[in-house]
Amino acid sequence: MKQVVVIGGGIAGLAAAYRLTELAREHNQPIGVTLLERSRRLGGPIQTVHEDGFVIECGADSFISEKPWAVELARRLGIDSELIPTGESRRTMVVCRGRLTEVPQGFNLMAPVNLMPVLRSPILSLRGKLRLAIEPMLPRRVAAEDESIAAFVTRRMGREVLERLAQPLAAGIYTGDPAVLSIEATLPRFAELESHYGSVIRGLKAVQKKTAARSASGARWSLFLSFRHGMRTLVDALAHALGNSIRLETGAQSLIAPAADAKWRVRTGAGAIEADAIVCAARAPDAAALVESFEADLARSLRRIGYSSAATVNLAYKMSDFPRMPQCFGFVVPAAEGREIIAGSFSSLKFPGRAPDGFILMRVFMGGVLQRRMMERGDEQLIAAARHEIAALLGVNAAPILTRVARWSDSMPQYAVGHLNLVSEIEQRAAKLSGFALAGAAYRGVGLPDCIRSGEQAADAVWSYLHSTLRQSAA
């Protein structure tokens, strides 16, 4: 029987392991799969806690439905009936001069579909609005090389749009510095709109018309989805499907590449494991440490991928503690505001069943590249900072009835300018290793669907290799 070891119990590793079991069943081939996870739990940045009637998401709380891989996996696992859409209030707010202000209707991360809502908004000055208004008249960029989000937005929409809207909205996704993050790797759609339509605003309008025509019969899902009892539902379903193939608190300490017809060897604290193939779904620096002894160039490339740290602070309040009921799912905070949080969201407004009646569950986000100093504080200090910001922005001075802090150290890959070229280089080097594949958020997408896709693609690559060896053996 062929054996595959999957290193890393995050979503990419779980998806890879499950895909391998699916392929083995489909092709009636006996293949053993062992998944190694160094910590006590699976799921990486997915961690759901049920406490006193609250469904608390310490990490990712939803995923985007436009990318199909998460919904498809849920269907194959038989848990698609547990998927729930967001509630009705889908507005997003941004902190502007110390006050929560609605992001103009139709504003899409860094550019508007229509100018009029932006022109009516107090977020931009008259000068900033005029600068944005000329975007359709600017010539498209001819150069083909990558550029940063900051360079792209400033060039097309102006610095004020960057500082007041694009930076906080992008930071809410990548917890990074837009002056470093690659537009091609993080938000390629906007670069494509400029290239194809000559203008981001004109391109957004054209895409909106096409989308409206395609979805005239009504879309099945909202833009964001979660599970009725929290995101852990997906992790639990994958863990149940994989059963005894999972080894918790068993990290890969070293990896020995096969010589001639020998097998891979994975050394763990509990001993060595032999394998015919490896899927490495560990973080890039951890993967680098594993391959360094036999592929130093690959290790060096992997170490070029940086990471940021962040923390979430969940807080539960009585509804009566709020002077006014929030009318949005959440808000983002520009770095220019000088505050100690980068975003906030109202979990119990975003999805049903997250809090008992009469209560509001919310969470704030701290840290990231632009607020590294926050990660040096203790949990009580983070809670105090969160309460201070909530009081200042929302007028809530009461003590929360529940708090929970979660820290995610070096958890978010930073796709710097040139990231896609770096990933291509990594993939080419990794492809030279027989029976070896990389997967995870470090490469071509940080969201849940992207991680699932990465894991499944790695599983498919490993399966192709094993299938070819099985054919050779039969011959």
Image: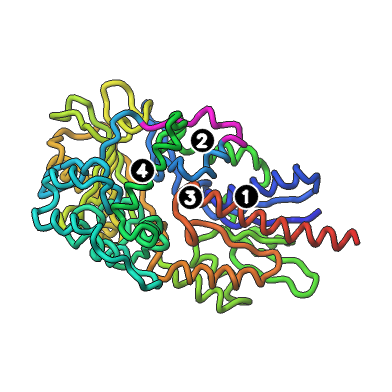
Label 4 vs label 1, nearer the camera: 4
State the CA–CA distance, disc 2 to disc 3. 14 Å
Tell me if residue 258 is in the magenta stretch. no
Disc 4 element:
helix
Front residue of 410/470: it is: 470
Q: Earlier in the sequence, mark 1 or mark 3?
A: 3
User: Dot 3 corresponds to which residue?
Assistant: 44
Furthest toward the bottom, the residue is: 297
Taking the image as shown, residue 137 lies to the left or right of residue 141, namely: left
Q: Earlier in the sequence, mark 2 or mark 4?
A: 4
Tell me where residue 429 sits by quadrant. Answer: bottom right
Q: How many neighbours does mark 1 have within 10 angstroms: few (below 14), some (14-19), or many (20 or more)?
A: some
Asked whether the residues under the numbered discs 4 and 1 touch, taking CB atoms below 8 Å apart as contact, a structural biologist would say no
- 289 shown above or below 439: below
State the CA–CA distance, disc 4 to disc 1. 47 Å
In the image, which disc is placed on residue 247? 1
User: Dot 2 corresponds to which residue?
Assistant: 233
State the CA–CA distance, disc 3 to disc 4. 35 Å
Disc 1 element:
strand
Taking the image as shown, residue 283 lies to the left or right of residue 410, namely: right
Segment tinted magenta in the rendering: 75-86
The amino acid type, in three-letter code, at marker 1 is: Arg
State the CA–CA distance, disc 2 to disc 4. 33 Å
Q: Earlier in the sequence, mark 1 or mark 2?
A: 2
Label 3 vs label 4, nearer the camera: 4
The amino acid type, in three-letter code, at marker 2 is: Thr
